[in-house]
Image (cartoon, helix red, strand yellow):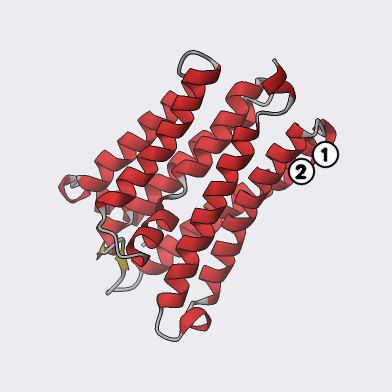
Amino acid sequence: MAMRQRGEPFFFWFSAALIVIVVAGFSTAALGRPGGVLATPIHLHVHGAIVLSWYLLLACQSRLIAAAAIEQHKRLGYLSVFLAAAIIIIGYLVVRSVLVRPDGVIAGRPAVYGAMFPVTDIVNFSIAYSLGLLSRARPRAHKRLMLIAAILMIDAAMARLVFGVGLPAPFILLAELALFAALLGYNLVTLRRPHWATLLGIVLYASAMVAKVNVESLHWWPGLLQTVFML
């Protein structure tokens, strides 16, 4: 009971760790471009700013709960919805901007196949975040779903960070699984059981990984992309 009254600091520090990954990952990618940060297209700067703002707000919301500032937490929730919608919209536009280029590449693959990476991330983020909103009256589920939404969206930043420090691709998977393991372990320690929201996050993540690995064999995928992105 005492831990719940303190707002469970775990969620703030976990959010803070995700912010470090986002900042380090995208900073490494931007600095590694020929010409540095200034060579990064403006729409990618906007995308990064919106995503980072959402992660910062996630950490802020955790601190407000820890301080029992419930009303401020609720008011800032409207900003969270706005930023989440902006993430989905600009994510769609960024993916489309690459798909329309004949030489477009995403995640090291031709864009038509590499698009599975950001598309599944956007879809999973949307699912977890929407369920988090619907679970506002259930604090345990609400905060876990919001954290899971953040983990499910971390793939692009994690990949840039891992490659930026010279590690091979499997470390992306290992690092992301470690995030889920930390949340699952926290559930087992505090609740003595896995929480359904965490298990859902693991299922969504595993489903996305299967799709990413097997995208070349999905013959319906290029046609779906053409329809969804109006190519």
Instruction: Work out how far the residue at label 1 is from the one at label 2, CA to CA, in angstroms.
Output: 6 Å
| Residue 65, image x, y percentages | 74, 33
Q: Amino acid at mark 1?
A: Gln
Q: Is residue 217 above or below residue 35?
A: above
Q: Is residue 151 left or right of residue 178?
A: right
In the structure shown, which secondary structural element does the residue marked by tag 1 occupy? Answer: helix
Residue 156 in picture, x, y percent from top left = 41, 56
- Relative horizontal placement of residue 213, taking residue 56 as reference (left or right): left
Furthest toward the left, the residue is 217
Q: Is residue 79 above or below residue 107?
A: above
Q: Residue at x 47, y 19 (%)?
A: 188
Position in image of residue 131 (x %, y %)? 56, 29
Query: Foreground: 163 or 34?
Result: 163
Vertical relation: 11 (above or below) 1: below
Residue lying at the far bottom of the rendered structure = 35
Q: Amino acid at mark 2?
A: Leu
> The residue tagged with tag 2: helix, strand or loop?
helix
Residue 72: image tag? 1
Tag 1 near tag 2, CB within 8 Å: yes
Q: Is residue 208 left or right of residue 62?
A: left
What mark, if any, has residue 37 been given in the picture?
Answer: none
Estimate how packed mark 1 is, as few (under 14), some (14 to 19) or many (20 or more) residues with alpha carbons within 10 Å.
few
The residue lying at 42 percent from left, 68 percent from top is 97
Relative depth, front residue between 126 and 158: 158
Residue 69 visible in the displayed image: yes
The picture quadrant where one finds residue 71 is top right
For label 2, the residue is 76
Locate residue 20, reporting x and y percent. Answer: 54, 55
